[in-house]
Image (cartoon, rainbow, N blue to C red):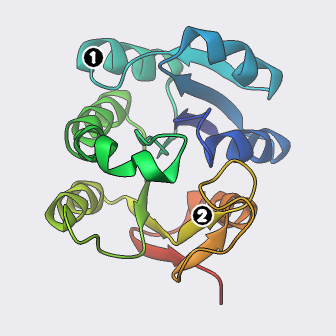
């Protein structure tokens, strides 16, 4: 399957890209950072440098690749948990405008599968943004993946467990792969 992976250098994307390639998929990995393109190529993907907020360039990139599936793993989060509040508006924009642009690009390309990252809890602030994000995905017959809080290398919780709901970032990536064949709906991926 041809898979367009948006957010290929994020905490899930860096794990999901090699799993997709090992599974025999042809993958375009999108990043907004030209410096990270070589990382995508090293993982076996075709690097696509594009900003999700540039709707026209995004549409052209997705249509050119002609994916059967688009996987939305985009976030805008800091490296340190203590800085999270300062990124709330930027991450909300990814969920609203970014999702809208990616959905439009997937439709223009004729992709018949769309998967999108979400969260398995409702935040104290911004819950309506999460719900609107999920509604956009479900409206096109996509799969919403509600992940627990990630822990493990490269996450906010490298050496400790976050409060539930939570999931190992490596397990989350592995559990995402079979969702390429899942029917439309909401799937929750958390530790049992």
Identify the residue at horizontal 65%, vertical 83% (top origin): 191
Mark 1 → mark 2, Cα distance in angstroms: 29 Å
Q: Quadrant of the C terminus?
A: bottom right
Few, some or many residues within 10 Å of mark 2 (<14, 14–19, 20+): many
**Can you say whether 48 is above or below 184 in the image?**
above
x and y percentages locating residue 160 in the rendered image:
70, 70
Q: Which residue is mark 1?
A: 54
Between 130 and 5, the one lying in front of the other is: 130
Identify the residue at horizontal 62%, vertical 45% (top origin): 11
Left or right of 101: which side holds 158? right
x and y percentages locating residue 94 in the rendered image:
30, 39
**Can you say whether 191 is above or below 72 in the image?**
below
x and y percentages locating residue 35 in the rendered image:
63, 10
Q: Is residue 113 visible?
A: no
Few, some or many residues within 10 Å of mark 1 (<14, 14–19, 20+): few
Q: Which mark is residue 150?
A: 2
The secondary element bearing badge 1 is classed as loop
Between 140 and 87, the one lying in front of the other is: 87
- Determine the image quadrant of residue 170: bottom right
Between 44 and 124, the one lying in front of the other is: 124
Between 171 and 3, the one lying in front of the other is: 171
Q: Quadrant of the N terminus?
A: top right
- Determine the image quadrant of residue 123: bottom left
């Amino acid at each position: 399957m041809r898979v367009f992976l948006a957010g290929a250098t994020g905490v899930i994307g860096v794990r999901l890209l090699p799993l997709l390639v090992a599974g025999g998929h042809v993958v375009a990995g999108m990043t907004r950072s030209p410096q990270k393109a070589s990382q995508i190529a090293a993982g076996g993907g075709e690097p696509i440098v594009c900003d999700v907020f540039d709707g026209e360039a995004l549409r052209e990139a997705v249509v050119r690749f002609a994916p059967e599936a688009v996987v939305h793993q985009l976030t805008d989060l800091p490296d340190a948990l203590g800085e999270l509040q300062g990124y709330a508006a930027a991450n909300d924009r990814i969920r609203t405008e970014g999702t809208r642009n990616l959905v439009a690009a997937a439709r223009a390309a004729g992709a018949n599968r769309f998967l999108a990252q979400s969260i398995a809890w409702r935040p104290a602030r911004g819950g309506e943004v999460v719900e609107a994000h999920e509604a956009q995905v479900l409206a096109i017959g996509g799969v919403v993946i509600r992940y627990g809080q990630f822990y493990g290398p490269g996450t906010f919780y490298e050496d400790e467990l976050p409060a539930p709901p939570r999931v190992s970032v490596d397990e989350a990536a592995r559990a995402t792969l079979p969702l390429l064949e899942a029917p439309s709906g909401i799937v929750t991926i958390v530790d049992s």
